[in-house]
Amino acid sequence: MIHNVTLTASCMTCNTEDTVTVTVDDYHQYSWGNKLVQQVWPTLSTWEREVIIGFRTGVFQCQDCWIKEGDEE
Ligand SMILES: [Zn+2]
């Protein structure tokens, strides 16, 4: 039986929450197995991976803010 877990990361700029749903097994491979996020989830988009990394590290910026900050430079 596959158990899913929903990971939530809050944008450090605008506080928008993004979520990604993954299996518990996959998340354990990432959090305990020392695997890179792209090794565990090769098919996820860059932004979905960013949410997972943000959930783990507490540092996350949503796509909208990332694009806005990019425009200001
Ligand atoms: Zn944001």
Image (cartoon, rainbow, N blue to C red):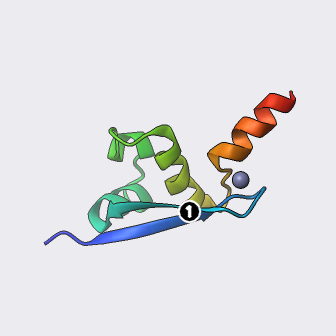
Task: Farthest residue to the left: give it.
Answer: 1
Front position in the image: 45 or 59: 45
> Can residue 36 be seen here?
no
Task: Farthest residue to the right: give it.
Answer: 72
Q: Residue 10's quadrant in the figure?
A: bottom right
Q: Is mark 1 within 8 Å of ligand 1?
A: no
Q: Residue 51's quadrant in the figure?
A: bottom right
Task: Count residues near mark 1 (Cα–Cα under 10 Å), then give few for <14, some for 14-19, many for 20+.
Answer: some
Q: Residue at x 53, y 66 (%)?
A: 8
Q: In the rendered picture of this protein, how many numbered marks are placed on residues?
A: 1
Q: Residue at x 59, y 56 (%)?
A: 54
Q: Which residue is mark 1?
A: 55
- Measured as percent of width and height from the top left, residue 50 is found at 55, 48
- Measured as percent of width and height from the top left, residue 44 is found at 38, 43
Q: Is residue 15 left or right of residue 49?
A: right
The N terminus lies in which quarter of the figure?
A: bottom left
Q: SS class of the residue under badge 1?
A: helix
Q: Residue at x 68, y 45 (%)?
A: 64
- Measured as percent of width and height from the top left, residue 26 is found at 31, 58
The C terminus lies in which quarter of the figure?
A: top right
The three-letter code of the residue at mark 1 reads Phe
- Measured as percent of width and height from the top left, residue 22 is found at 34, 60
Q: Is residue 70 left or right of residue 23?
A: right
Indicate whether 56 appears above or below 49: below
> Can residue 53 be seen here?
yes
Q: Residue at x 38, y 62 (%)?
A: 21
